[in-house]
Image (spheres, rainbow, N blue to C red):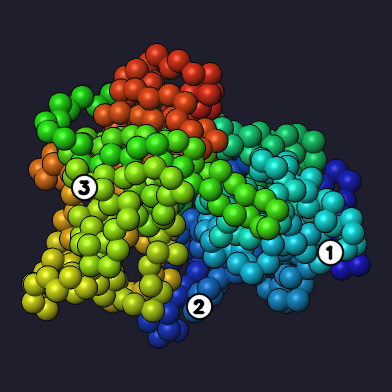
Amino acid sequence: MTPYLSAPTPAPTGPLLAVDGLRVAYGSHDDPVHAVDGVGFTVSRGEVVAVVGESGSGKSTTAHAVLGLLSGTGRVTGGTVTFDGVRLDTLPERAYERLRGARIGLVPQDPTTSLNPVIRIGDQVAEVLRIHGLADRRTAKIEALRILGEAGLDDPELRARQYPQDLSGGQRQRVLIGIALACNPDLVIADEPTSALDVTVQRRILDHLQARIAETGTAVLFITHDLGVAADRSDRIVVMQNGRVVETGPTGQVLGDPRHEYTRALLAAAPSLADTPVRPVYKAAGEPLLTVSNVSKTFRVDRRTSLDAVKGVSLEVSRGRTLSLVGESGSGKSTTARIAIRLENATSGTVLFDGRDITGLRGGELRALRRRAQIVHQNPYASLNPKLKIREIIAEPLAAFDIGTRTERARRVQELLDQVALSATHLDRKPADLSGGQRQRVAIARALALQPELLVLDEPVSALDVSVQAQILNLLGDLQTDLGLGYLFISHDLAVVRQVSDDVAVMRSGEIVEFGTTTDIFDHPQHEYTRSLLDAIPGKATHVR
């Protein structure tokens, strides 16, 4: 047995993971771009270290360098990475393959691109166990059901038979977390592991990780932009900016008495239920812009099984107002939103847009609706054409509807890029060249291009760091005030929901279980499920101001 796969020796000394002076470059050797420049930190056995910072700060690149998974032209140009006494930065690829999954687990940021779309969920979980010799074909299937259950998935037997595209974004992320923990690794590198999860499942998953740490001494390197999660769950925090560590220390010290200006700026931008005011109620005039009446949707899983994703849902969105849909992943929020703008057909019920029944629209009439109602998807990477440059992606809706000259479109693209806090240097890049947060900003810019009347915002800021999140939410607020836009806002981040919403609908198992103004829902929740969502919000135990 090779040393990098052997079990840790009794009473080990020194950190489990040590990163020292790490430098990572992309591009040509003649003109490299250093995404990570001299980063150093340690992770001890049983310790949770959170790496925080804006998208593009080098957090994920650092994690990928530790695992030997740098993409494209990425390469380590300096420093060392040591795991349990073994140098990883010089490790052969075959040795790395035996190490990954067995002793170092990874929860990647993007669940859509990390799961095979043509293999059933249960088989993908079982495959990890078989590759590392922890189960045979029969026992691997049994263990896969246990792992899916521990990861918080309802009805593991059903989910095991489904494909990734049959699950919600949060459910897919839970599958990846289960895979990462399947082989009982010594270290888990979690790259935004809960960004797609609702707060109750987020708490369950993080409680599970915490229990594993206590039982086995598993260490966690936590890459996150959620300072509430970092506050609640980490022992130490590493703050990164522009590829460098600007501050590090125990969590209480960094959050309670930040020394660096950048750290203070991050904390100032983080939404918090403790000090985020409830949005003033806007009195909309006239008829609702969007009316969903008694809508239901049933999906066929296989010849034997069907799934009632939405059950008799009714809601209204008026011009100048924001209705937020909240609830656990798989509760029917995204399906309801897709039905509302005819990206999905309802099994029953009706949808009115500006007083007109759009339930049966086809052809040119349906295309005309697209200009008036746009969506920002939960997963920006899956919704952006990977072959197009950013300037082409944002201009695409303008060209499709023959709006403006080539010069006018180019000017509009630059305006939109400025609105979402991206520079002109991003125009000739492709989605794969951007961070998750940068891709989400591009998706928002594209949705705004046609100046729609209704925006469906499906987790629009879940991939954004807190400072850019604040900019985007302020931008959406300004646009709504100036243009009278109606927003159907879907989010699992209740601090954000409190900040932007006029009204809130709470969904559970395809049904709306509580509806009211933002003040009523947050200050006087009536349903037990609503109260459980509020109790699970991260950052309440440790105030980050």
Q: Nearer the viewer, mark 3 or mark 2?
A: 3
> Where is residue 65 shown, x and y percent of the image?
58, 65
Mark linked to residue 356: 3
**Picture mark count:** 3
Classify residue 55 by image quadrant. Answer: bottom left
Establish if 84 lies above or below 314.
Answer: below
Q: Quadrant of residue 26?
A: bottom left
Secondary structure at numbered mark 3: strand
The answer to which of marks 2 and 1 sits earlier in the sequence is: 2
Q: Cα distance, mark 3 to mark 1?
A: 55 Å
Mark 3 or mark 2, which has the lower sequence index?
A: 2
Instruction: Report the amino acid beneath label 2.
Output: Gly
| Quarter location, residue 111 | bottom right
Dot 1, how many residues are within 10 Å of its Cα: few (below 14), some (14-19), or many (20+)? some
Amino acid type at image mark 1: Arg
> What residue is shown with label 2?
72
